[in-house]
Image (tube, rainbow, N blue to C red):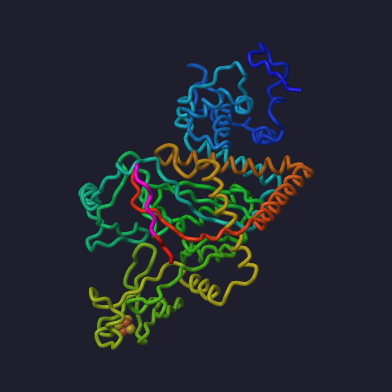
Amino acid sequence: MIGNQDRWQEDLFVACPLRDLIPDDHILKRVDKILDLSWLREEVKDCYCLDNGRPGIDPEAAVRLMLAGLFQGIIHDRRLMREAQVNLAIRWFAGYRLDEPLPHHSSLTRIRQRWGPERFKRVFQRTVAGCVDAGLVNGETVHVDATLIRADVSWASLAERHVAQVLKENESDNGPEDPKGGHGPGGGRSRSRKSRKYSTTDPDATLATGNKKVRMEPSFKQHTAVDDKAGVIVDVAATTGEASEGVGLVSQLDRVQENTGRKPKTVTGDAAYAHSGNYAELENEGVDAVIPPQSQQRKPKRIPARRFKYDGKHKLVRCPAGKLLRRSGWRPSRWIYRARLCDCRACPLRPRCVPPSAKVRTIGIAHGHEALLRARRRHQKGWDEAARDVYRRHRWRVEGVHGEAKKWHGLGRAIRRGLANVAIQVYLTAAVINLKRLAAWASPPQPLAAAMRRLTGSLRMVLHCLWHLTQPRKVPSQPQRPIGVRLGEKPHFVQLAA
Ligand code: SF4
């Protein structure tokens, strides 16, 4: 019998709680079971006046609204509030009744500005703690990696920054740095005098690329540490795009230990983390660094530094001609070893060793050089099966998390401008991913339903293959290509094969 639905019937009351109208397997319903934000009110208390002013939005409701948006890939506040008007699940998750007015979208912006990134970092850290308590974090093996986030600026906002002029002006303010133009120990890297582009609308974003074949874009960078056991994000941080990921590895591992309460035993990373200082620090800490050293130039123009022998005990370097190079000064993060002028002048290897612009050969030895040599030797001999296995997992664990954040939770592009806003986006996205892991652990899919889904998928694939096999093969008799077809003209074909 044909059914008949009265579309104009409107109920004055809903005769059941909102919770009952939301399916049990809805992500927000599953997350609600494990999400506890009761501590938040106390955390943000100092951001509000206690005895004056208009009552603000409940902190827990605000964070729940932001999380609900990210769970569903809704990253803009306006769209989120428009969706929340009609979306039962978001209303229920944030604690708003059906007839209750929702906050204005700009209130969420004000809350972010008022709280700052540190409060949102706490939200993320609480999700890590929840995962640790649930046994989802082993803490022994951590995969670290970084990914670029496109800044929310247009190409038209890029302008040239004349670094030389800025440095000159700074110098006149602070006095000259060094009469010889060098830097003392611990100083920053000598800056390029070339003009560089920056965004006038978001100066925190810098030009960066993850691939030499892809042009540089104004970006931020997310630094992620993922636990091996269940893919829980145990630390996350945001920097400007040009920041080197390898520089902050040691501090990132300290934060991982702080967040999880466990010291990692193995760390995996790509060659961007292959800094000699990182190898040395990890060796000192007793952490196994499964990080491939950077590949070396195949056909270097000059005799490469690896042909020079370093004697760490006597702090000397011996060149391929057997002459000694001695320490002559400190540059940022490395000691400079210099050959004697009389040795290089008479040396037959000079044309292949000393650059035309220099009189003698110099070699930079960074902190932890011996640890780097040991890592290189270990990699050249071939990693053992355990190291190869854990490095294989690195790719799908941490890069998978980056893909998930970008594809499903809108991390491909910064929503707002400024490093603080990007940091908030990064913390909330990481919290959402951890909550998904936690929700899956708390309410695993029903075994029967999961088995049925797997069976249906397999059956569909088999039927698809069978259908393809039964189809007659179409062999194009005369490959033809239309050329020069204009409107109103008959197509004219040209023969491609005899
Ligand atoms: S040019 Fe100088 S540093 Fe190079 S091999 Fe000869 S003596 Fe050694």
Q: Nearer the viewer, residue 80 or 343?
A: 80
Locate the C terminus by quadrant.
Answer: bottom left
Left or right of residue 160: residue 493: right
**Residue shown at the point (59%, 47%) measured from the top left:** 259
Left or right of residue 397: residue 296: left
> x, y percentage for residue 134?
71, 45
Residue 484 on the magenta segment: no
Left or right of residue 477: residue 446: right
Q: Is residue 403 above or below residue 114?
A: below
The magenta segment is 488-494
Left or right of residue 87: residue 245: left
Asked where in the image residue 183 lies, by quadrant, the reply is: bottom left
- For ligand 1, the image quadrant comes to bottom left
Locate the N terminus by quadrant.
Answer: top right
> x, y percentage for residue 480?
43, 57
Q: Is residue 447 above or below residue 299?
A: above
> x, y percentage for residue 74?
52, 34
**Residue shown at the point (70%, 31%) measured from the top left:** 23
> x, y percentage for residue 350?
28, 83
Number of residue marks = 0
Q: Quick one: which residue is furthest to the right in this view?
A: 448
Q: Nearer the viewer, residue 288 or 204?
A: 204
